[in-house]
Amino acid sequence: METKSALPLLLLVSLANALSGCGANSDGLVTIIVKDSQGNPVAQAAVQITGPQERLLTTNSQGIATTSLAAGNYTFTATKGNLQGTKTQAITTGTNTVTIQA
């Protein structure tokens, strides 16, 4: 009767577990809030994000869009009709809120 070592399987499982955690904490959850000059939410505004990663989002009926981004410095530009606003902000791991007045 042959016995086989479980060491290769154990190493493979350990490597898979280690890799599954890679990058898990490197992104930040970003909530973008777009408001007009009176503080009212701007629904259906286009939000362009530029920086280490790029995105093009649209706000919901409450003027909110969400995404996840790698940590770094970003520029957020919101536009709708004749409304436009820009904000530059550092995104960190964890939860981030970006408020843009358009």
Image: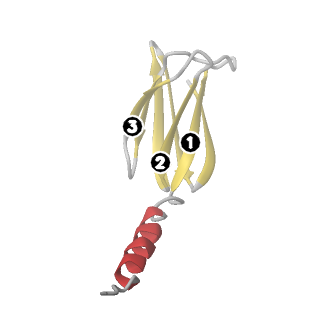
x, y percent for residue 98: 60, 39
Whichever of labels 3 and 1 marks the residue nearer the N terminus, that label is 1
Q: Residue furthest front?
A: 1
- Residue at label 3? 55
Q: Residues within 10 Å of mark 3 (few under 14, many from 20)?
A: few
Residue at (48, 27) in percent of width and height: 78
The colour style of the image is secondary structure
Q: Work out whether mark 2 precedes mark 1 in sequence or the reverse, and give the earlier one.
A: 1
Comes first in the chain, label 3 or label 2: 3
Q: Amino acid at mark 3?
A: Arg
Q: Position of residue 79 (x, y in %)?
A: 45, 22
x and y percentages locating residue 89 in the rendered image: 55, 47
Q: Amino acid at mark 2?
A: Leu
Disc 3 from disc 2: Cα separation: 9 Å
Q: Residue at x 46, y 14 (%)?
A: 82
Q: Residue at x 37, y 42 (%)?
A: 54
Q: Nearer the viewer, residue 76 or 9?
A: 9
Asked if the residues shown at circle 2 and circle 1 are in contact, with their CB atoms under 8 angstroms apart, the answer is yes
**Mark 2, residue position:** 69
